[in-house]
Amino acid sequence: MANWYAQRAWIGEMADDVLIEVEGDRISAVIPGATPPPDAHRLPGVTIPGLVNAHSHAFHRALRGRTHAGGDFWSWRDLMYEVAARLDPDSYLALAQATFAEMALAGITSVGEFHYVHHDAGGVAYDDPNAMGRAVLEAARGAGVRITLLDTCYLRGGIRSADLSPVQRRFTDGDVEAWAQRVSELTADETTKIGAAVHSVRAVDPTSMERVASWAREREVPLHMHVSEQRRENEECESVFGMSPTELAAQHGVLGPRTTVIHATHVAPLDVELLGTSRTAVCLCPTTERDLGDGVGPASAFSAASVPWSLGSDGHSTIDLFEEARAVEMDERLMAGARGIHDPAALLTAATLNGGRSLGWETGAIAPGYLCDLVALDPSSPRLSTSPGVGGIVFAATAADVTDVIVGGRAVVTERRHRDLDDVGGRLASAVAGVLG
Ligand SMILES: [Zn+2]
């Protein structure tokens, strides 16, 4: 694999003329102030580590621009279920591949796909019971991004009612052992990992939750779970179990250093303490949380409790990790009436290194030993030409400033074009039309 030579790069600080030597798919040396060797590929502009989107539901991309006018989380969920009901392995492959290609163009080199649409629209297993999961894995491969498929256990309609609505039937394997059996048939490779997820305290009973957690622990793979996105979830959990979703997860073995809880918007100080002491991570999804009117998660409380937090575009109302990163700071400013809560380097770390850890990839830093996942930004763009430092990048860059994307040492995007998939916008339009009918 050839070496890369960045005009300027973020290596924990900004450095010029950085030679990034590569062995296999990893960085073997980083040499600032180097003269360019003749055989190195040049990266123009400012190079940062590959961005990591730690929480995605690829099919939600079909809802962009169609659900934002009103309603609440629960009415949004009804629309999302309508799309879920129309997916099959072929349409899911097309939609997920186009969505992951949009991510690649936005500088996202790894994605965590929280995957729960497992079976056909009637709830019957396909001939290959993992047909949908494999479609998602193939989609990521085609789009050139790493994926951790967080295969999700989903067993019941809600905390108070075990009954599943007709559309939810395709999410369930019936019981947790059937879930474990199916997921165990999926295999990882160089750019894909198989992890596990508990959908939420709504969809999984405590005993099953415990089994999913032990399945993930035995295999030492990432485990994710939606937690406390909505106050209603907290109220129902308190009334049935007499404790918060985080406490319930803690009591049933879900928390730990390989676990990431998603959202954690409405958490109490005791919940934050439990996350901290168990070394659990959090993934915030600010553009989704604001789109759905969820609330603002306490990122500064997580930082104070040494809870690492990453970022996800979740419902894909936009796919732009720069926007997610600055939203954490900006939303907390509005709540606190104060500025400068998180420094720009910490926000960039959330969008890179912390996401990699959450998904089980050694990515997110331009340093020896890390995977060679890189993103180059155009410093002459109107947004960056006056302030191409880390503050300018985090507070002003957008996905449109990404020019080149490298995954495992291989170019996936060059000069704003995906090397394997042309016309990503057109692919998205036809894939979305395919599932909206
Ligand atoms: Zn989600």
Image (spheres, grey):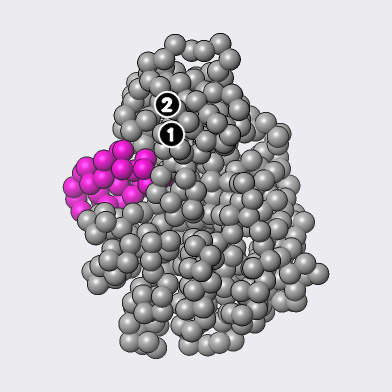
Q: Which residues are magenta?
A: 324-351
Q: Position of residue 405 (x, y in %)?
A: 55, 32
Q: Is residue 432 left or right of residue 340?
A: right
Residue type, label 2: Val
Q: Is residue 343 magenta?
A: yes
Identity of the residue drawn at 54% across and 41% down: 109
Can you identify the residue that label 1 sits on? 368
> Which element is circle 2 on?
strand
Residue type, label 1: Pro
Q: Is residue 108 left or right of residue 269?
A: right
Whether residue 128 is visible to the viewer of this picture, yes or no, is yes
Whether residue 232 is visible to the viewer of this picture, yes or no, is no
Q: Position of residue 47 (x, y in %)?
A: 45, 27
Q: Position of residue 115 (x, y in %)?
A: 59, 63
Location of residue 326 with respect to 230 vertically, above or below: above
Q: Position of residue 123 (x, y in %)?
A: 71, 76
> Which element is circle 1 on?
loop
Along the line of sight, which residue is nearer the eye, 105 or 371?
A: 371
Location of residue 129 with respect to 27 vertically, above or below: below
Instruction: Report how far apart the C-alphas of labels 1 and 2 lie in the structure.
Output: 7 Å
Identity of the residue drawn at 46% across and 21% down: 19
Q: Are marks 1 and 2 in contact (CB under 8 Å)?
A: yes
Q: Is residue 272 left or right of residue 203?
A: left
Q: Which mark is residue 260?
A: none
Q: Quadrant for the C terminus, please.
A: bottom right
Tell me which label, 1 or 2, sits earlier in the chain: 2
